[in-house]
Image (cartoon, rainbow, N blue to C red):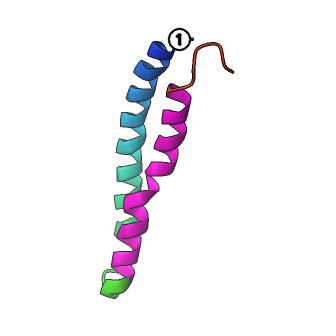
Amino acid sequence: MTQSTRKLIGTALIIVVLVVYALLAVALYLLLPPDLPTAVQLLYFAIAGLGWAFPAGWVIRWMVRPDGVR
């Protein structure tokens, strides 16, 4: 598979991952009790806000691999 093909697939995959991740983060937040302290909510949003970077990073690493490397 060429790098340009991986970039096309990877771009679509990142969009799907981000949408699914956002939906899961919101669903998890809605399951939390509404009277959580502000500090706990801030911690949740900090972790949830950065959590998408790990799966996106894996996809980006796969996308930029040179041709012919498995």
Compared with residue 8, is residue 18 higher up or lower down, i.e. above or below?
below
Q: Secondary structure at mark 1?
A: loop
The kind of residue on which mark 1 rests is Thr
Residue drawn at point x = 53 percent, y = 11 percent: 2
Q: Viewer-proximal residue, 45 or 30?
A: 45
The C terminus appears in which quarter of the rendering? Answer: top right
**Residue 9, position as x, y percentages in the image:** 45, 21
Residue drawn at point x = 50 percent, y = 26 percent: 63
The boundaries of the magenta stretch are 40-63
Compared with residue 69, is residue 48 higher up or lower down, i.e. above or below?
below
Question: Predominant secondary structure in magenta?
Answer: helix
Task: Determine if residue 27 is in view.
Answer: no
Residue drawn at point x = 54 percent, y = 34 percent: 61
The N terminus appears in which quarter of the rendering? Answer: top right
- The crowding category of the residue bearing disc 1, from other C-alpha atoms within 10 Å (few below 14, some 14 to 19, many at least 20), is few
**Residue 56, position as x, y percentages in the image:** 46, 42
Q: Where, by quadrant of the figure, is residue 31 drawn?
A: bottom left
**Residue 45, position as x, y percentages in the image:** 35, 68
